[in-house]
Amino acid sequence: MEDNAQFREQSRLRLSMLHPEAILEQMDWNVKAKGNPDEVIIECQMTGILSFPNNCFHVAIIVSEVNDHYLAYNNLINDFIKETIRTDYEVRVSNDSFTNDNVLTTKELPFSTIVYLLTKKVTIDIEKIKSNFKSAGLILRIRDEIYWQKTEEILKQSVFLCHDSRDKTKFVDELYFALTGRFIHVWYDKRSLEVGDSLTAKITEGIKDCRYGILILSKNFLSNRKWIDVELQSLMTKQIHSGEKVIIPVWLDITEEDLKNEGYFWLLD
């Protein structure tokens, strides 16, 4: 029992790490044997996850071992949604993937049909489980220990987004979600800064802690000399001192001539 409790706590932390500020509801859930209310055949935790980018919710099942009882999961999901998510309380949702200034009730919030299954061990054919979920119109994403080992390695590959603020809506917001959707930790001023932070100090800290710096090269960026001096020089210094590739340039609607005209010949390599 203690091991199960530790596993649940670890899984809750992992969910919070990948879906910060987005947990709608968490509830312990037991399925008991027919005719014997003292016998628990499934002991799990159900979690509702709010997806800010899409203004919908997903469901997560935390269970230490997946065995033949997986056939009961579909009913578990339906009961959980009906008894918790659909109880008509208010949640704040997003206008632009970063703000949460609109209010919906949970009855209005659509279910994405995505189900995360967090488990230590799967003792039956995974394809059978996936097929069962698919037949119920659900999309299954299994998160076992092998998955988390790989994910935690990816999370170490953090990146710093170096860009001009005028390119946020056009490109950088979408890039941020593409990276975080692959569980890569991203330093992005829109998400990483808080009221009262020193911009220069936080940028310096973000560059220091990152593994890579993604440089969004655009005409807006090239015309913004102040932050080029701060961010680009810091990334160059980090690359020289580490002796490793740090800067990853991304060209956004610019040409070689644009870089040459601004004197950035080294970015053509």
Image (cartoon, rainbow, N blue to C red):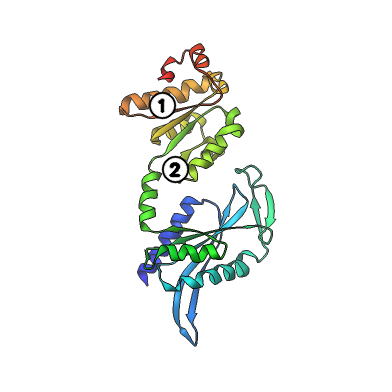
Q: Amino acid at mark 2?
A: Ile
Q: Position of residue 190 (x, y in %)?
A: 56, 37
Q: Residue furthest bottom?
A: 35
Work out whether residue 200 can be spotted.
yes
Badge 2 marks a residue whose secondary structure is loop
Compared to residue 137, the image places residue 30 above or below, namely below
Quickly name the residue at label 1. Answer: 235
Viewer-nearest of discs 1 and 2: 2
| Mark before the other along the chain sequence, 1 or 2 | 2
Front-most of residues 202 and 55: 55
Compared to residue 187, the image places residue 71 above or below, namely below
Residue at image point 41% right, 25% down:
234
Residue at image point 35% right, 68% down:
3
Front-most of residues 226 and 70: 70
Decide: few, some or many residues near mark 1? Use Cα within 10 Å; few <14, some 14-19, many ≥20: many
Give me the C-alpha separation between circle 1 and circle 2: 19 Å
Q: Position of residue 48 (x, y in %)?
A: 56, 60
> Which image quarter is the C terminus in?
top left
Q: Position of residue 268 (x, y in %)?
A: 43, 19
Residue at image point 35% right, 52% down:
149
Q: Amino acid at mark 1?
A: Leu
Front-most of residues 116 and 90: 116
Give residue 90's quadrant in the image. bottom right
Quickly name the residue at label 2. Answer: 184
Residue at image point 58% right, 29% down:
167
Compared to residue 154, the image places residue 265 above or below, namely above
Q: Is residue 5 left or right of residue 179?
A: left
Badge 1 marks a residue whose secondary structure is helix
Work out whether residue 196 can be spotted.
no
Front-most of residues 194 and 14: 14
Decide: few, some or many residues near mark 2? Use Cα within 10 Å; few <14, some 14-19, many ≥20: many
